[in-house]
Amino acid sequence: MVSSDKVTISADEAGRSGTVHILAVRYADRDVYCTLNEALVKDCSFRTGGRYDRNDPLDETLVALIPKNQFRPFDKMIWI
């Protein structure tokens, strides 16, 4: 789960500029990444998320749920 703006703005910029944008995630046992592009945005689910424990509506935002199968280990990354 990540802010939808981070995903959509990065994917738009990648398409506009022709550059590669990635999202890196560190798990306890490995580091993975996904490429932020239009295809990823279409594969995401979007919902409201955030912190609900403080009863502050500003803590809630639209988030992107990226499917786990979109992430690849860094050793499979092709460096351009």
Image (cartoon, grey):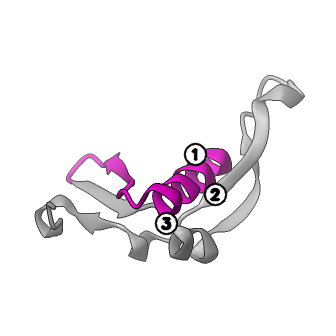
Q: Which mark is drawn over residue 64?
A: 2
The number of callouts visible is: 3
Q: CA distance from mark 3 to mark 1?
A: 11 Å
Q: Amino acid at mark 1?
A: Lys
Q: Are marks 2 and 1 in contact (CB under 8 Å)?
A: yes
User: Which secondary structure, mark 1?
Assistant: helix
Q: Which mark is drawn over residue 37?
A: 3
Q: Which of marks 1 and 3 precedes in the sequence?
A: 1
Q: Is residue 47 above or below residue 27?
A: below
User: Which secondary structure, mark 3?
Assistant: loop
Tell me which corner region of the image, top left, top right, bottom left or bottom right, holds residue 76.
bottom left
Q: 22 left or right of 38?
A: left
Badge 3 density bin: few <14, some 14–19, many ≥20, Cα 10 Å: many
Q: Is residue 30 above or below residue 54?
A: below
Q: Are marks 3 and 2 in contact (CB under 8 Å)?
A: no
11 part of magenta stretch:
yes
- At 83% from the left edge and 27% from the top edge, which residue is drawn? 58
Which residue is denoted by mark 1 in the rendering?
Answer: 6
User: Of tags 3 and 1, which is closer to the observer?
Assistant: 3
Q: Quadrant of the C terminus?
A: bottom left
Q: Amino acid at mark 3?
A: Asn
Q: Is residue 42 above or below residue 37?
A: below
Q: Which of marks 1 and 2 precedes in the sequence?
A: 1
